[in-house]
């Protein structure tokens, strides 16, 4: 029988690429979007879900279980970018980002766990970010929200061992998607002490996304994880130097690594 896969944020970017790839490979895929009516040409069903609204999560799970007897794989892919000097990002935007990138995935996990526990099987893949392994300048809130999801996955894994439910993280680097367009950008203020350096860093970040890898690489990585009997705790997918930056953070003195980051962003 084909495995049933639920992908949050499956209407565009990495989620869409993963959904299409898994569909071709024979999986029964359900994606989600806040506005599924906008994606009638999707190659797999799109169900309404907003990860910041628990009632829509429950409704989405119930809708899928009307058609399927189980949910084998959950891919927590929905997320949002955010940039800006931490001092200047409004508190409500910081909270909104954590609602999407941290609390949202946790609530989706909580919603599928009863089903997975009942079927005595499940795999949960949390899509985080290489940015979650380090505090990046002018991306600090994003780094923190993704890093929090990485850490809570480690705890969750141990709590779920008795139920034959696996959980893992996949941290992508920069991929050519529309994430920059949907990202919250704190405005570059004329009278801001961060104006010049934040403005330059913003351009650099957008260039990295535009020049990013094909999201099919993420789809292939997720396919391989699904077919792995005992997934690792952490996976990284992206350009060599992006993945190597995590290694450097582990082995270099903190201030040396900080200097490398600042040089990279021309700070």
Image (cartoon, grey):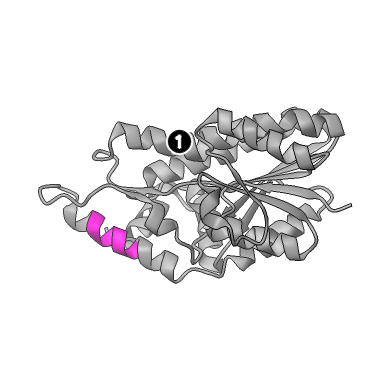
Q: In the image, what residue occupies the spot 51% across and 66% down? A: 241
Q: Position of residue 118 (x, y in %)?
A: 84, 29
Kindly identify which residue carries mark 1.
98
Mark 1 element type? helix
Crowding near the residue tagged with mark 1, few <14, some 14–19, many ≥20 C-alpha atoms within 10 Å: many
Q: Position of residue 212 (x, y in %)?
A: 48, 68
Per the picture, the main secondary structure of the magenta-coloured stretch is helix
Q: Please indicate whether residue 265 sits to the left or right of residue 73 in the image.
A: left
Vertical arrangement, residue 30 with respect to residue 109, above or below: below
Q: In the image, what residue occupies the spot 78% across and 42% down? A: 67
Q: Please indicate whether residue 77 sits to the left or right of residue 158 in the image.
A: left
Q: Position of residue 226 (x, y in %)?
A: 77, 53
Q: In the image, what residue occupies the spot 78% across and 48% down? A: 4
Vertical arrangement, residue 21 with respect to residue 73, above or below: below
Vertical arrangement, residue 34 with respect to residue 217, above or below: above
Q: Please indicate whether residue 1 sits to the left or right of residue 21 in the image.
A: right
Q: Please indicate whether residue 13 sits to the left or right of residue 256 in the image.
A: right
* Quarter in which the C terminus is drawn: bottom left
Query: Residues in magenta?
Result: 198-204
Residue 155 seen in the figure: no
Tell me if residue 21 is in the magenta stretch: no
Q: Position of residue 10 (x, y in %)?
A: 59, 53
Q: Quadrant of residue 119?
A: top right
């Amino acid at each position: 029988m084909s495995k049933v896969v639920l992908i949050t944020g499956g209407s565009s970017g990495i989620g869409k690429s993963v959904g299409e790839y898994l569909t071709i490979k024979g999986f029964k895929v359900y994606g989600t979007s806040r506005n599924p009516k906008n994606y009638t040409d999707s190659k797999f069903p799109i169900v309404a879900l907003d990860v910041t609204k628990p009632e829509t999560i429950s409704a989405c799970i119930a809708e899928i279980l009307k058609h399927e007897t189980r949910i084998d794989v959950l891919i927590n892919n929905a997320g949002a970018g955010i940039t800006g000097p931490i001092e200047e990002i409004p508190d409500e935007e910081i909270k909104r980002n954590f609602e999407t990138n941290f609390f949202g995935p946790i609530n989706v996990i909580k919603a599928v766990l009863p089903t997975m526990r009942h079927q005595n099987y499940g795999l949960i893949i949390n899509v985080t970010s290489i940015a979650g392994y380090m505090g990046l300048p002018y991306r600090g809130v994003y780094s923190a929200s993704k890093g929090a999801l990485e850490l809570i996955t480690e705890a969750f894994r141990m709590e779920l061992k008795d139920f034959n439910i696996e959980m893992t993280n996949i941290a992508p680097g920069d991929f050519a998607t529309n994430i920059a367009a949907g990202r919250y950008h704190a405005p570059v203020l004329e009278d801001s002490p961060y104006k010049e350096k934040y403005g330059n860093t913003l351009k650099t970040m957008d260039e990295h996304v535009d020049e990013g890898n094909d999201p099919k690489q993420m789809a292939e990585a997720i396919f391989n994880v699904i077919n792995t009997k005992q997934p690792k705790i952490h996976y990284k997918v992206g350009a060599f130097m992006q993945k190597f930056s995590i290694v450097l953070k582990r082995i270099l003195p903190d201030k040396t690594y900080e200097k490398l980051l600042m040089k990279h962003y021309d700070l």
